[in-house]
Image (cartoon, rainbow, N blue to C red):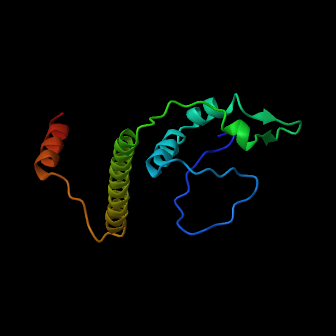
Amino acid sequence: FPLGIIKQSYTEAPVIVSPLYGVFTPESEALGLILDSLFESPVTVQNYLHPLVQKGAKNTIAITNTRFLEGKLNLPRDLAEQEAIADYIRNDRAYVESIDAEITALKRQKRGLMQKLLTGEWRVGGDDAKTSKIEKETAHG
């Protein structure tokens, strides 16, 4: 995100925000979620901000609130459509979170199994039938 980030805050409590940041309130919660999802992509952020941002002499980035809002996006105006898209995003994020939780659990399980193997608490035995067959073939070979 070389030109900056665009994120939605999920903080319920009142907070203090640096004057270096622009704070905007979307028309609906669903629209805020759509915008947050849209701007998760560095490419989308780059494409939106590049025509709007002015870089200073020391490579500083400057953009006014008015200039930021001049950017164009194709977003649904209908509240029902916004909510339907937001539901899809919520479900997608829940699915990704469940997969992440499964990956975390499997990594934890792997660490536990490796610990038991490395300490010798558990031993891995070979397949005797295959071993004896290989030994016989090598001996006769």
Residue 113 on image: x %, y % = 31, 63
Identify whether 16 is placed above or below 56: below
Residue shown at the point (24%, 59%) measured from the top left: 124
Left or right for 85, reference 43: left
Which quadrant holds the C terminus? top left
User: Residue drawn at (68%, 38%), measured in percent from left and top?
Assistant: 68
- Please, which residue is most extreme toward the left here? 129
Locate residue 137, reporting x and y percent.
Answer: 15, 37
Number of numbered callouts drawn: 0
Q: Quadrant of residue 85?
A: top left
Q: Nearer the viewer, residue 138 or 2?
A: 2
Location of residue 72 in the rendering, given as x and y in whole percent from the top left corner: 59, 30
In the image, what residue occupies the spot 29% across and 71% down?
A: 121
Is 103 in front, or is 38?
38
Name above or below for residue 42 compared with residue 132.
above
Is 139 or 132 nearer to us in this picture? Answer: 132
Instruction: Give whichever of 59, 7 is nearer the camera.
Output: 7
Residue shown at the point (79%, 40%) measured from the top left: 62
| Quadrant (top left/top right/bottom left/bottom right) for the N terminus | top right
In the picture, measured across the screen, residue 119 lies left or right of residue 27, that is left
What x and y, as percent, mark residue 108?
Answer: 36, 63
